[in-house]
Image (cartoon, rainbow, N blue to C red):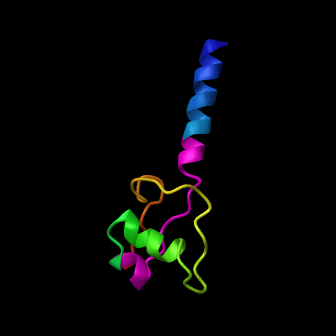
Amino acid sequence: MAVFGVVTIFFLGREFMSAAPRISPSVEHKAANTAEDCLACHMGQTKEVPIMPHRPMGTCTFCHEKTTPSP
């Protein structure tokens, strides 16, 4: 039962961490180097930018992976 619990917790943790969407390779995202740069758009009044549906974190790339442009 303990092994089942550990496997379940590992699986849920891995799925939780991979649930964040990737950062698109747009010009604005390439220019953003810090979490403050991201917050300026996603918490500001910029039109057509989705709001950030969670509390600000220390870094964005801990959960959100940057998308590499395909060759």
**Total tally of numbered discs in the picture:** 0
Quadrant hosting residue 3: top right
Q: Residue at x 56, y 32 (%)?
A: 10
* Residue 40 in the image: above or below residue 19: below
Q: Residue at x 57, y 80 (%)?
A: 49
Q: Residue at x 62, y 61 (%)?
A: 53
* Residue 34 in the image: above or below residue 13: below
* Residue 31 in the image: above or below residue 11: below
Q: Is 37 or 65 nearer to us in this picture?
A: 37
- The quarter of the picture where the N terminus appears is top right
* Residue 6 in the image: above or below residue 38: above
- The quarter of the picture where the C terminus appears is bottom left
Q: Whole-percent x and y of residue 21?
A: 56, 63
Q: Is residue 23 left or right of residue 68?
A: right
Quadrant hosting residue 31: bottom left
Q: Is 35 or 61 nearer to us in this picture?
A: 35
Q: Which residue range is magenta in the image?
A: 14-30
Q: Whole-percent x and y of residue 51?
A: 60, 71
Q: Is 3 or 50 nearer to us in this picture?
A: 50
Q: Whole-percent x and y of residue 48?
A: 61, 85
Q: Is 44 or 52 nearer to us in this picture?
A: 44
Q: Is residue 9 left or right of residue 71?
A: right
Q: Residue at x 64, y 21 (%)?
A: 5
In the image, residue 20 lies in the stretch drawn in magenta: yes
Q: Residue furthest front?
A: 45
Q: Whole-percent x and y of residue 59?
A: 39, 56
